[in-house]
Image (tube, helix red, strand yellow):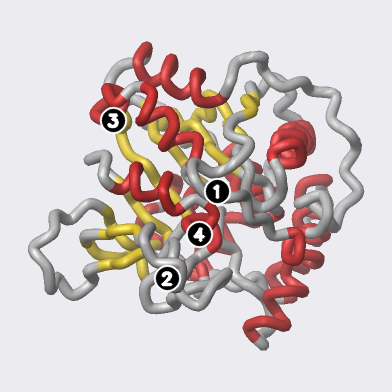
């Protein structure tokens, strides 16, 4: 087996973030060298705690978790308790974490790690707003060529928006940070709503997680039972999209996904379309291609992978 791919997970847990983190911690192909929390789905005081809870749920109590940006670069923080509940992880009754946060600020950790390790050896997995990563790039621009790749959940093109008519939540929360990241010249793989809306956590798929019978499987079923109630009503189907695990699944089984290399620009000037990800899907401009934008996923294989890996925990 090839050497494990070394990743840092930047996250704002969130039930779907939790599933993504559990998938990463259960996958031998990946070595998680740190988790950085950012404000997003809920405020930072909750996302940092939720990251600790998820590590304990996975039995990975030695994982290093760092607390990061408390708010976006420019705009006030927008959160999503209407989807994720008051704690961000409503659904299961997870105990208060015994693990402690690392003393180092997440942005300092990112800069120190990327500057200190072999160039191209670390992949960043961005599951929330891109504030921490943008702050690290602003503080130390020399990290940009040292990042192997950023694989991120965020944005939309064909599916347009899920928090405003034109913007996906993660990008909308901190569009200025997203603009910094997309202009940094780093290889980016983008998992937009166009692909995540094809990965639906139907009642049958959620039941398969519960049937695993382990703590992680049951907790995931309870998390999705809570968060999916909002999406089922919104999208009028038997299950809502499972966004963030697409990032980790791509690193484990990239053949599950397909898309194309495009230019992506982030709207930061218009209140009407603030946070819109403007994807040049058809190549109608001469702007430089800066992201592989995914559009298709094999949902059956995706959920099979998730169930198998969660069963290991």
Observer-side mark, 2 or 3, equals 2
Whether residue 101 is visible, yes or no, is yes
Residue 144 image label: 3
The answer to whether residue 58 of the structure is visible from this angle is no
Q: Position of residue 138 (x, y in %)?
A: 36, 29
Looking at the rendering, in which quadrant would you find the N terminus? top left
Left or right, 36 with respect to 155, comes to right
Q: Please tell me whether mark 4 or mark 3 is closer to you in this view.
A: 4
| Residue at mark 2 to residue at mark 4: CA–CA distance | 9 Å
Q: How many marks?
A: 4
Residue at coordinates 52% horizontally, 62% vertically from top-left? 302
| Spatial CA span between label 2 and label 1 | 19 Å
Where residue 156 sits: x, y (%)? Answer: 41, 68
Question: Helix, strand, or loop for circle 3?
Answer: helix
- Disc 2 from disc 3: Cα separation: 28 Å
| Sequence-first disc among 1 and 4 | 1
Tag 1's secondary structure? Answer: loop
- Res. 115 image quadrant: top left
Of pointers 1 and 3, the one earlier in the residue sequence: 1
Q: Earlier in the sequence, mark 2 or mark 4?
A: 4
Give the residue at the far left of this rendering: 286
Q: Quadrant of the C terminus?
A: top right
- Residue drawn at (39%, 34%) of the image: 123
User: What label sits on residue 172 in the rendered view?
Assistant: 4
Badge 1 is on which residue? Answer: 128
State left or right for residue 289 relative to residue 123: left
Q: Which residue is located at x 29 percent, y 26 percent?
A: 141
The residue carrying mark 2 is 273
User: Which numbered disc flags the more N-terminal residue, 2 or 1?
Assistant: 1
Give yes or no for contact between labels 2 and 3 (Cβ–Cβ under 8 Å): no
């Amino acid at each position: 087996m090839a050497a494990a791919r070394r990743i840092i997970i930047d996250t704002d847990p969130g039930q779907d973030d939790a599933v993504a983190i559990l998938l990463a911690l259960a996958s031998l192909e990946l070595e998680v060298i740190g988790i950085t929390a950012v404000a997003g789905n809920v405020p930072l005081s909750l996302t940092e705690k939720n990251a600790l809870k998820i590590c304990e749920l996975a039995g990975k109590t030695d994982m290093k978790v760092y607390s990061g940006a408390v708010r976006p670069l420019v705009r006030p923080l927008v959160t999503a308790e209407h989807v994720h509940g008051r704690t961000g992880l409503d659904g299961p009754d997870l105990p208060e974490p015994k693990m402690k946060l690392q003393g180092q600020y997440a942005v300092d950790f990112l800069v120190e790690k990327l500057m200190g390790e072999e160039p191209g050896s670390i992949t960043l997995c961005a599951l929330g707003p891109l504030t921490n990563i943008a702050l690290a790039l602003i503080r130390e621009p020399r990290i940009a060529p040292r990042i192997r790749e950023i694989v991120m959940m965020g944005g939309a093109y064909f599916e347009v928006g899920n928090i405003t008519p034109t913007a996906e939540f993660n990008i909308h929360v901190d569009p200025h940070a997203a603009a910094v990241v997309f202009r940094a010249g780093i290889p980016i793989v983008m998992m937009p709503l166009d692909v995540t809306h094809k990965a639906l956590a139907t009642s049958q798929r959620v039941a398969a997680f519960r049937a695993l019978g382990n703590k992680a499987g049951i907790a995931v079923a309870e998390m999705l039972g809570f968060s999916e109630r909002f999406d089922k009503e919104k999208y009028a189907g038997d299950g809502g999209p499972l966004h963030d695990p697409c990032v980790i699944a791509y690193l484990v089984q990239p053949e599950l996904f397909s898309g194309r290399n495009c230019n992506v620009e982030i709207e930061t000037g218009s209140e009407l379309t603030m946070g819109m990800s403007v994807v040049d899907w058809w190549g109608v401009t001469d702007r430089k291609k800066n992201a592989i934008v995914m559009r298709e996923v094999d949902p059956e294989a995706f959920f099979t992978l998730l169930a198998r890996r969660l069963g290991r925990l």
